[in-house]
Amino acid sequence: MGLMDKLTAGIERVAEEADKAIDKGKAKVGEMQIEMQMDGLAKKLGYLVFDFYRGREVDQALRQKLLDDLSQLEDRLFQARAEAAAASGPDAPGGADEQAGAASESDRVPPFGA
């Protein structure tokens, strides 16, 4: 293999790794956006709970919509995380094998009331 062939192969590997890093970054941004949406819904739901606690009238249809939307977002978040783990591959650092059993407490969405 000549010097130019080795150089070309090295450049191609670097380009592939850069593409993987960009894809991983995009996935993380997507997860963060979902988490931010969930935080907004949880905040609204928290105000409804506070209103209920204070004896104010609470719109049950709105409460249910917030709960449904929050559940859907949680499902999307879990799906996005699973896809990111699968895309990184089992041999990659932080890949599917490493992430499968190593979901930290910070990766889990806390249940209500926690």
Image (spheres, grey):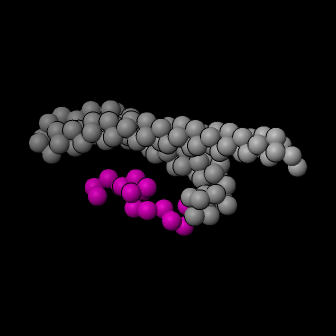
Residue located at (48% from left, 62% from top): 103
The residue nearer to you, when weighing 33 against 7, is 7
The location of residue 12, given as percent across then percent down, is: 74, 41
Main SS of the magenta part reads: loop
Would residue 79 appear left or right of 12 to someone viewing this image? Answer: left
Q: Is residue 107 magenta?
A: yes
The location of residue 38, given as percent across then percent down, is: 38, 40
The location of residue 98, given as percent across then percent down, is: 57, 64
- How many marks are shown on the rendered structure? 0
Residue located at (54% from left, 37% from top): 26
Extreme-right residue of the structure: 1
Extreme-left residue of the structure: 54
Q: Looking at the rendering, which quadrant does residue 16 occupy?
A: top right
Q: Looking at the rendering, which quadrant does residue 58 occupy?
A: top left
Extreme-front residue of the structure: 3
Would residue 63 appear left or right of 54 to someone viewing this image? Answer: right
Quadrant including the C terminus: bottom left
Residue located at (67% from left, 60% from top): 90
Residue 100 vs 47, above or below: the answer is below
Q: Looking at the rendering, which quadrant does residue 14 occupy?
A: top right
Viewer can see residue 16: no
The location of residue 36, given as percent across then percent down, is: 37, 38
Q: Which residues are the magenta region?
A: 99-114
Viewer can see residue 26: yes
Extreme-bottom residue of the structure: 101
Q: Is residue 86 magenta?
A: no
Would residue 46 appear left or right of 105 to someone viewing this image? Answer: left
Residue located at (36% from left, 55% from top): 110
